[in-house]
Image: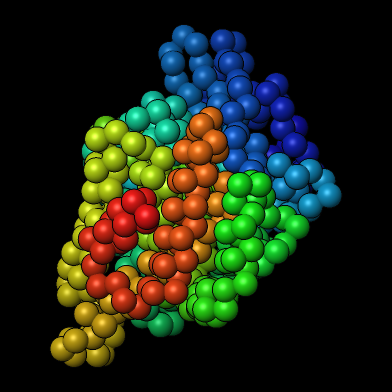
Amino acid sequence: MNTSTHATYEPLNEQTAIQLAVKLNLFDDSTGLHCREIGDGNLNLVFHIIESATGRGTIIKQALPYVRVIGESWPLTLERARMESEALQIFARYAPDYVPVVHHTDEQYAITVMEDLSRLTIVRTGFAEGAVYPLLSTHIGEYLARTLYGTSDFALGAEARRELALQFHNPELCKITENFVFTYPLIDDESNAVEPGLSELAQQLWGDEKLLLEGAKLKQHFMTSAEALLHGDLHTGSIFASDEETKVIDPEFAFYGPIGYDIGLFIANTLLSALARQDDTRAQLLHHVTNVWDVFQTRYSELWQADNQEYFAKVPGYLDYQLQHMLEDTVGYAGSEMMRRVVGLAHAKDIEAIQDDAKRLHIKSSAARLARDFIVNRSHYRSAAQIVQALQQADQG
Ligand code: SR1
Ligand code: MG
């Protein structure tokens, strides 16, 4: 095996992943090393290597030259490994507490070797099992404010921002989002996975001209607005957490886009988990929705006031205008994400796991109606508390 720049790409397996870890001097030799492939996402391989004597571990993530869940019939650029590794290192400049440490990257091999986070759990899984992660939204709000403000024109100045944006074109991954988040869920596309009890509602949505128009505007804004370096796929499956710690992983969809997209994805997936939860801990998940926006807004405003390259930054009303615009985008993109998790290709595992058909259908139709409202009426929202009120109404209706 070769991880020099002259290496020829080949997918790792549990044995070659161990050999690679030793070759990279992450461990002295292969004695007592155990490796498991633990990737459960749609795209990549993820190897967890652990040394039995010390309990020390590492993660090797490798991009496959195709979409893992579909197979070789859907080729996909290996460049996404570079996007992920470089984005993690840039985010670490602004929010080091909230991303894993990158130990090594190899473009040819499409791998990123990073900190073992197995002490934490994936938030989507934890939410499905009843966890609440009390600090989650405070940490994510802080992470969002620091990474999004830090990579914006306001912090970097336009020239440096444009240069950084060149590093993150990411056209193939953006195309996946454009199709599978924005276009296909709003039309009767063959890739959609609509369960039979929802087909009437899906037909209604696909014929809803207001929804199509507002969905089209959100897609266009996603494609053309280069406000900050986004994570690009910040659902709850991209976050590891415990009661004390939070780490954002998997930024392979990173690109320069609208700030509200990252915030909207976190909110959408948290709302879906809240809808799936019937006990009195639902309120704690809903608190994450208001709190993530409140923390983001407060920290973003502080950063704006402390250090800003924009000549007009102190013009009265300009920051408020930006915050309102980001809230509207957040609400709209939360709607796009919720819609695709109900009628699109990639569903939310925690909702799919609900065995009771009537309950699952009720949750999905509430989510789809709420998503429609978020997309169509996003400009009416003035606070995150209104997002939570809308969920409560949708769930009762
Ligand atoms: C076919 S890929 C579908 C989804 O998987 C990734 O995790 C992204 O969320 C993408 O939209
Ligand atoms: Mg992912």
Which residue ends up furthest to the right in the rendered image? 73
Asked whether residue 80 appears in the rendered view, the answer is: no
In the rendered view, how is the structure colored? rainbow
Foreground residue, 220 or 163?
Answer: 220
Foreground residue, 175 or 344?
Answer: 344
Which corner quadrant of the image does residue 17 belong to?
Answer: top right
Which corner quadrant of the image does residue 277 belong to?
Answer: top left
Expressed as whole percent of the image width and height from the top left, the position of residue 231 reads 47, 58
Q: In the displayed structure, would residue 144 be above or below residue 281?
A: below
Asked whether residue 385 appears in the rendered view, the answer is: yes
Residue located 79% across and 43% down the image: 71
Q: In the displayed structure, would residue 365 be above or below residue 2?
A: below
Left or right of residue 274, residue 61 in this image: right
The count of marks equals 0
Quarter placement of the C terminus: bottom left
Residue located 26% across and 83% down the image: 321
Expressed as whole percent of the image width and height from the top left, the position of residue 66 reads 75, 48
Quarter placement of the N terminus: top right
Residue located 57% across and 46% down the image: 347
Foreground residue, 131 or 23?
Answer: 131
Residue located 23% across and 54% down the image: 291
Expressed as whole percent of the image width and height from the top left, the position of residue 131 reads 33, 31
Foreground residue, 181 or 106?
Answer: 181
Expressed as whole percent of the image width and height from the top left, the position of residue 161 reads 43, 76
Left or right of residue 14, residue 132 in this image: left
